[in-house]
Image (cartoon, rainbow, N blue to C red):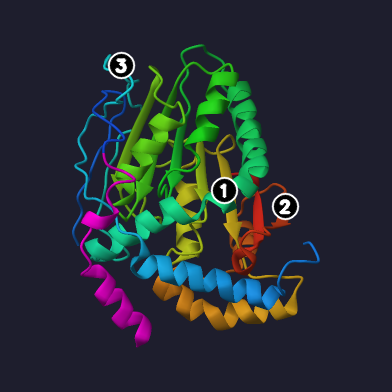
Amino acid sequence: MFVTTALFLAAAMPNSAFQSERQSVYRRQNTFHAVNNEIEDEDNQSPPRSTQRRQFMSRAAFSTVGMYTSANLPIDNDLYCKCCLKKLPSANALVDLAPSPSKFDYKRNEALDSIFSCSMATTMKDYEEEARPYKSQLFRSLFDSLSMSKGKVNDTPVIVEVGMGTFPNAIYLAQSIQSSSLKSLDIIGVDPNDSMKQYALENAVKSGLSLEDVSLRIVHGVAEALPIEDASVDAVVVTLTLCSVSNPQLAVSEIRRILKPDTGKFVFWEHVLSESDDMLALEQQLLSPLQTLVADGCHLNRRTRSIITAAGFQGEIKHTMMKSADIIGPTIYGIVNA
């Protein structure tokens, strides 16, 4: 009851006091296609582990219910960078988008979406820094495999990021394409929270992804009903996404549906229920209901490894423990084949 009331009060807070960090960051640069498809419908001095978890949950809840709010900056079909007024053409998009209404695409609260998107943009820096070595290797391996599977110079891989969010993976895509033999890239970001788009576009430019032959489209959609044709995608990326979808089994099935058979790659980085620490697993089970309230449906107790393997994907699934976010520390990651 307290959490619900706090969320309601946070939604009514004015945004003006928190706009300075993000205003005047970007002017308009014709670099990306931003498409909106509107669909209704352990060291010894560290505190004890249990204390770390409580502190993490407190910070997450506090930031989510109103410590940060975002400015409602306009989202246009073109984006301009303040550092460069020269217009750059973008690559032609290769895959047609065919959004369809879904029972999973429920009506969302725009104010809460705005608060949550800003929270994700401002409170995950330590986590993303710890994840950097793992993610860098993942995306290098992905682009190595994409380069080998593309026989022609003009072949352009299509990559779909499901649950793109604020697009923290933009830096890895930018680095990978610049160091690979690939000449172009078609990226499609899918997210049900439309407030994420402004952050995603900014991260794309800051990461150096504003290349002439990179097409970026960000569309509204849900993982359980992806607005993309069958067998049309070279790779699907999900990071911290399957924890919050309504039906993870259906979402993984959709990912397999849109991937090209035999050659399609599924790249994932997901926090899961601990399988090695019984006390941590118990805490995750107990705190999961609260987490779903303050973190846009995020579950702490998902067994995502078994969901991926049950869908027929094959490949090595690795495991690590993220020290910067203990309650969501147990993590699986890898690249598996469709």
Q: If the image is split into quadrants, where does the N terminus sit?
A: bottom left
Residues at marks 2 and 1, CA–CA distance in whole angstroms: 18 Å
Q: Is residue 31 left or right of residue 337?
A: left
Residue 160 sits in quarter: top left
Q: Is residue 233 above or below residue 62?
A: above
Q: Within the image, what quadrant is residue 46 found in?
A: bottom right
Q: Position of residue 213 (x, y in %)?
A: 40, 18
Give the residues drawn in magenta, as a range.
Answer: 1-23
Q: Is residue 300 visible?
A: no
Q: Which mark is residue 88?
A: 3
Q: Position of residue 146 (x, y in %)?
A: 58, 27
Q: Earlier in the sequence, mark 2 or mark 1?
A: 1
Confirm or deny contact between disc 3 and disc 2 (CB under 8 A). Answer: no
Contact between labelled residues 3 and 1, with CB atoms less than 8 Å apart: no
Q: In whole angstroms, how far apart are the C-alphas of marks 3 and 2? A: 39 Å
Classify the position of the C terminus by image quarter: top right
- Camera-side mark, 2 or 1: 1
Task: Check disc 1 and give the amino acid type.
Answer: Glu
Mark nearest the camera among 3 and 2 is: 3
Residue designated by label 2: 318
Per the image, is 13 magenta?
A: yes
Residue 11 lies in the magenta stretch:
yes
110 is higher (above) or lower (below) than 230: below
Q: Is residue 8 left or right of residue 135?
A: left
Front: mark 1 or 3? 1
Q: Of label 3 and label 2, which has the lower sequence position?
A: 3
Q: Which residue is mark 1?
A: 128
User: What's the amino acid at mark 2?
Assistant: Lys
197 left or right of 206? left
Q: Nearer the viewer, residue 332 or 15?
A: 15
For label 1, the crowd category at 10 Å Cα-Cα, with few meaning under 14, some 14 to 19 and many 20 or more, is some
